[in-house]
Every structure is written in structure tokens, then in C-alpha cells.
Image (tube, grey):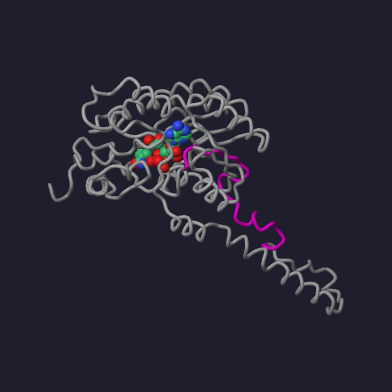
Amino acid sequence: MMQAFGVVATLTPTRQRPGAADNGGPTDLMKLTKSSVAPAAKQESASTPESARAQSVAAAVEVPTATAAVAKPRVSRRLSRPADDCVREGLLKGKKALVFGVANDHSIAWGIAKGLYDQGAEVGFSSMASLIKRRVRPLAASIGSTFVEGCDVRDDDEIKKVFQRWHAKEGNLDILVHAVAYAEKEDLAGNFSATSRDGFHTAFDISVYSLIAMVREARPYMPPGSSIMTMTYYGAEKVVPHYNVMGVAKAALEASTRYLAADLGPSGIRVNAISAGPIRTLSAHGIAGFKLMYGGFKDVTPLRSNISIEDVAGTAVYLASSLSGKTTGEVIYVDGGFNILGLPVADEQL
Ligand SMILES: NC(=O)c1ccc[n+]([C@@H]2O[C@H](COP(=O)([O-])OP(=O)(O)OC[C@H]3O[C@@H](n4cnc5c(N)ncnc54)[C@H](O)[C@@H]3O)[C@@H](O)[C@H]2O)c1
């Protein structure tokens, strides 16, 4: 049980410059590029000239008959539409999303961005400026996105600029994803009572206030039916060793979600939080012993499975879509049922 809890004590970014740590490699990016939808679109456009040539040859040699005169031209339905449109169907077709918090292709924010894109949404990105060139831009390009803006969420002006640029380039915003958190390493270990004042402020500024500031700037551009979501963890509700100040920050984030939901509800804008189980992200990898603790979670959570960024993306798509049209101010768990357990115990301990 403690092992599983310990996993999650490692879920916040570690001491490196906020947002600047980087453990993903070029291999990951290559893998991702290969599996992106781009090849499908390429295939479509590559076959178009051949088909067009074949059709024009056929038209030239065909002898008009009564049947031929009434027959519709045999243009493939697939090819008669823009290539991109062929793969952009989905629950979120026509929606525009802005995602904060991609550090690399292991980030929950990236899983969500890909999930939204796969369901037809157009997705833009904002991350720490230091991550943009090597990490975020290639990922964005793999899903055809050109909106990539740097932003340190400690700075109100930077946040404001991101939304102003979004509005100037993209117009309205239907989906806002906040997947950003940070606490100093020394405040994520040892006694909670040793938390420094500065460390407390930093954790709350980056992990909680940033949501409020983003919502304030995004609100004017979000039409009724829009959806905002943030990422939280069970350590907000129950004590998780070493999670310390981040647990308290997540509690404040969940409370902020409810207050924002009440605030924006009359405008038809929903605000929810996803409480994810432990996932191997950049933040999590910075902690010694994470692998061992991660394994413990799988042994005790009711669905006996670890959580992936794709699992979180599924719930994010639901929250972004009209399927959740009457759900706001909620914390929705994607943790294999871990939160329902009063006493998490592995099979071999029973
Ligand atoms: N990994 C998990 O197991 C897990 C579980 C539950 C909730 N969460 C939450 O999910 C969210 C995303 O984390 P992740 O696990 O994908 O890790 P991640 O490291 O991939 O993402 C964290 C992001 O926060 C950004 N960030 C930190 N300080 C910033 C600043 N000052 N300005 C702008 N961006 C800043 C980082 O650059 C990074 O992109 C966080 O809120 C985290 O607490 C994670």
C-alpha cells in the first residue's frame, strides 16, 4: 500500500527550473512522428494525381451512351474531400483547443492534445519558452499545429499575451487544458511542517493561481458550451507521503475548480478536474525509486493496471465534448478505482 502511495509522492515537477527539465529523447519524437496521422494525409494527396489522371483518360475514351449520360461522375468520395478532412471526423470536429503543459511526449498534456486532435479538434500549445524549440514544436507539427507560444505561468502578462495571440490568430477558444504544476524538491520530502514560505508560494503560484489567471484571460473568447479542465491528484484528499505541499496545492486547485465552475457556469462554460493515478512523466521520473513505487500501484488498484496518458485523454475528450454538457465543478478520477479503496492490499497479501 505504501509503495503505491509513494508513487504519487513523486508526481510533481522537481527542483530543476520550472518546466525546464527534459528527459525525453529524439527516439520518442521519431516514434511519435511515425505514428501520427500525417502519413494518412500524405497517402491521400499522393494518390490524387493518379486518380485524376485515370479519370480524365476514362472520360476521353468513353463513348457516350444513355446510361453514361445519367451516371454520376465516378469521383471517389474519399478523394473528393480535402485529405485532412478524411481523418478529422470525431466528437470534437470544429472545436479549437489550447493546451498548457506539454514538456515532452510523455506529458499528460500531450496525451490530451493528441486525444483531442484524434477526435477532430484543432489544437494549439503553450509551454515554457525553453521547451518550445526542441520539444513542443516538433510534437505540435506532428498534428499539424502551428500555434505554439512560450509562457511562464508565474507572469500574468505572459498569460494574457498567449490568449490575445490566440484570439488574433484563431478566434474563439472551445477547450482549455491546464496541465501545469511545480514545487521545490525540498518541499516534496520529509516533514510537511518544514515547508518553507517561499516554497509554499511557488507551489501555489504555479500549480493553482495559474488556472485562475488562465481562466480570466480565456473567458472573453470562450463561447457557451466551452470546456476547461485541470489535472489533480488524490493527494489533495488523503495524506500521501512526500506529496506534502503539492497535496495542499491540489486541494486548493480542486476548490478553485468548483469556484470557477460556479463563476463561469452562467456563461455556459464548464470547469472540471481530472484526478489521474500515477503516470511516468518527466516530473515523476525525477524521483529515485519511482519504478518500484509505480509497480505497487498496479498491484492494488481495483483495475490492476497502471494509468496511461491515453487513459487520461479519453476522459479529457469526454469533458471537452457535449457528452459532458451538464457536468461542471467535478473531480473525475482516472485511477483504476484506487480512490475507492479504504485499504489497498495486493493479492499476495490477502
Ligand atoms: N504524472 C502523474 O502521475 C500525475 C498524476 C496526477 C496529476 N498530475 C498532474 O498533471 C499535470 C501535468 O504533469 P505531468 O505529470 O504531465 O508532468 P510534466 O512534467 O510532463 O508536465 C508538467 C508541466 O508543467 C510545466 N510547468 C512547470 N512550471 C511552469 C511554469 N512556471 N510555467 C509554465 N509551465 C510550467 C512544465 O514545463 C511541464 O510542461 C500536473 O498538474 C501534475 O500535477 C500528474
What residue span does the magenta drawing correspond to?
78-102
Q: Position of residue 276 (x, y in %)?
A: 36, 39
Pick whichever, 237 or 186, lies toward us: 186
Q: Quadrant of ligand 1?
A: top left
Q: How many marks?
A: 0
Residue 334 visible in the current orientation? no
At x 52%, y 28%, the residue is: 214
Q: In the rendered image, which quarter contains the N terminus?
A: top left
Q: Where does residue 192 sit, x and y in percent of width and height?
A: 24, 25
Give percent across and percent down for residue 282.
Answer: 38, 44
In front of the other: 213 or 321: 213
Q: Is residue 100 magenta?
A: yes
Residue visible at 38% across and 48% down? 308
> Which picture quadrant has residue 8?
top left
Of residue 241 and residue 344, the one placed in the foreground of this image is 241
Q: Residue at 22% x, 33% y: name it.
A: 241
Quadrant in the rendering for residue 22: top left
Residue 117 versus residue 127 in the image, above or below:
below
Q: Is residue 170 above or below residue 296?
A: above
Q: Is residue 135 magenta?
A: no
Residue 62: x and y, percent?
Answer: 83, 78
Q: Nearer the viewer, residue 249 or 134?
A: 134
**Residue at 24%, 23% in the rendered image:** 194
Residue 65 vs residue 2: left or right?
A: right
Q: Would residue 322 appear left or right of 172 to someone viewing this image?
A: left
Camera sees residue 185: yes
